[in-house]
Image (cartoon, helix red, strand yellow):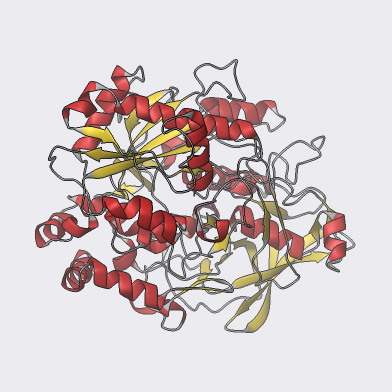
Amino acid sequence: MKLTVFTIIVLIVCLSGSCIATVVRKLTRLGPYGNQTLGDYVDFSSAWGLDYGNPNPKIRQSYDFIVVGAGPAGCSVANHLSENPEVKVLLLEIGKAEIAPAQDVPGAFLFQTATDYNFGYLSEPQPKGCQGLINKQCAFHHGRGLGGSTIINNMIYTRGNWRDFDGWNASGNPGWSYREVLPYYIKAEDANLRDFEDNGFHGKNGYLAVEDIPYRTPLATTFIQSAEMAGLPYIDYNSMDQLGASYIQSNIKRGVRWSAARALLNPIRKRKNLHVLTRAWATKILINDESKTAYGVEYTRDKITYTVKAKREVILSAGAFGSAKLLMLSGIGPKGHLKELGIKVIKDLPVGETLYEHPGVLGPVFLVTKPIDNNINFESIITLPNIIKYLFGEGPFTSAFSETVGYVKSPVSPYPDEPDWPDLEIILSALQLGDDSTTAGRTYFRVNDEIHESYFRPLFNTRAFMYLPLLMHTRTRGSIKLKSTNPYDHPLFNYTYFEDDRDLQAMVYAIKEAIRITGQKPFIDIGVEQYTRKLPGCEKFEFNSDEYWRCYAQTLTGTYYHYVGTCKMGPVSDPEAVVDARLRVYGVNKLRVVDIGIIPRPPSAHTAALAYLIGDKGADMIKEDNGLL
């Protein structure tokens, strides 16, 4: 495998970063059903895809369980349910197997969203945020393929604050307290952390690699030192303490991206009782209208429609968007919305009426005026010595550029009585968009030409870095609806960034905290200075004023695809709830949602770790309720 990676990176060296940019632009276009690339016409996964067993299994008429969606939650559910060889499981996935050579490399993550492994969703044009992005639309990246968004994400592993889970439990969701979920996190982990491995919060020998990023620039250590001087202690943010700063913990194993499929499907590829069917687009849940019981799934593959039955349960793990969309197409959702589209109502539930996301900002940006070693820059890191380092799990290719993180609490936090519960995350990225001649970064965030050319392009071939602050406890709430009854149409996202002005106030505070941290002596000693060029559209405001940074945040809005809440978990008394605490859809038998769509409120975490948790815990619930535990 490493030899194949070596071959591909050698080709990259031969072509050069600029040539690769041209190739990517020519082969990638935003199609009607997601990002379409050469991979839509030539299936590279058939030759170089990760081995997950027979790619064309003979599908039975029925299975004990059908799992729809092979993201981290779906992979977990399929893995754990098929541990019993007598239990027959079918896992349906819209996408393909990950192409191991191309998607192994953490440093290539920016390119992944410009492929057909991403649905290519977009927000509606925004009135308050995303003003400096193409058509004023933020990218709603959403992975498809075995591994889901763990194929295309930044691999950051954050579990959340203990108060998140205790809050779920206190809201009428028994079994989800921090004390009850922590064992699942520990059991899943195969941790390799330099400073925190033996503190009692991490596990060994689990399926999920959790490691320090092997490669660090001097900026990482400088940030930790400066954060401590600014009053943020050095912490393990995956323990009980989250207010502080730390190096990022990542789902990387010896320099290789550790996706959900690599962790959970590849090791069990020889199981005869698990069938994994790729390129299978689930279009409808089969439900007996009289008994309100799910009994199967309709799906299309190679333009042919099939049905398959489930003896025990149908489990939706298609993500916050996919599961909500499939429920509504099947007649489970808001009655008024379904009737407008002519969909027969099976069960009136508030599916899609809650949608949360973590809004972010691309900046502030800083210059490094003194030479430092190992500065990440696409133009300088693609070298033969770095290729050789990667073969040994070292060097800049093992990094996804996000190196350190700080957690702070804003004055407008929704939880003012919890002083140690941060609402803001500030990521230091050793890469800023001006470094990138391949256009991968600007494509990832959809930065428009004017902003890129006038603000980021002057930074090309300079030593610079940027922060990526994000708001974890947003007050802005949106919704997701169907555009039509066509299962291949993208959904309609009714989400307005900064609809609640307190979200914008919090982002300004995060930016100013990043500036305060970077003003400490360790950064000054390596010649770090703030980039003072004014952002187009914000010139009328005094630089560094609150008004300037409000304008900046509304212009360079970042999105981090942490969507939750569309199939909200809650007690029967909660008018927003779609599933109960055991993830069963209200009013429909033998149907569950097991993915991050069930998360009831914005979490203090990126969502990959939460998806694994929900899959692991959900699988145990399913086993228990079916007498299999």
Residue 32's place in the image compared with 200, above or below, is below
- Viewer-nearest residue: 85 or 353: 353
Q: Position of residue 366 (x, y in %)?
A: 30, 38
| Residue found at the very far left of the displayed protein | 385
Q: Quadrant of the C terminus?
A: top right
Position of residue 578 in the picture relative to residue 41 (left or right)? right
Q: Does residue 362 appear anywhere in the picture?
A: yes
Residue drawn at x 18%, y 32% as measured from the top left: 527
Q: Does residue 257 appear anywhere in the picture?
A: no
Q: Position of residue 422 (x, y in %)?
A: 50, 25
Residue 489's place in the image compared with 397, above or below, is below
Residue 268's place in the image compared with 564, above or below, is below
How many numbered discs sit on the rendered protein? 0
Give the quarter of the image for residue 417. Answer: top right
Residue drawn at x 34%, y 52% as measured from the top left: 456
| Residue found at the very far right of the displayed protein | 290
- Viewer-nearest residue: 446 or 428: 446
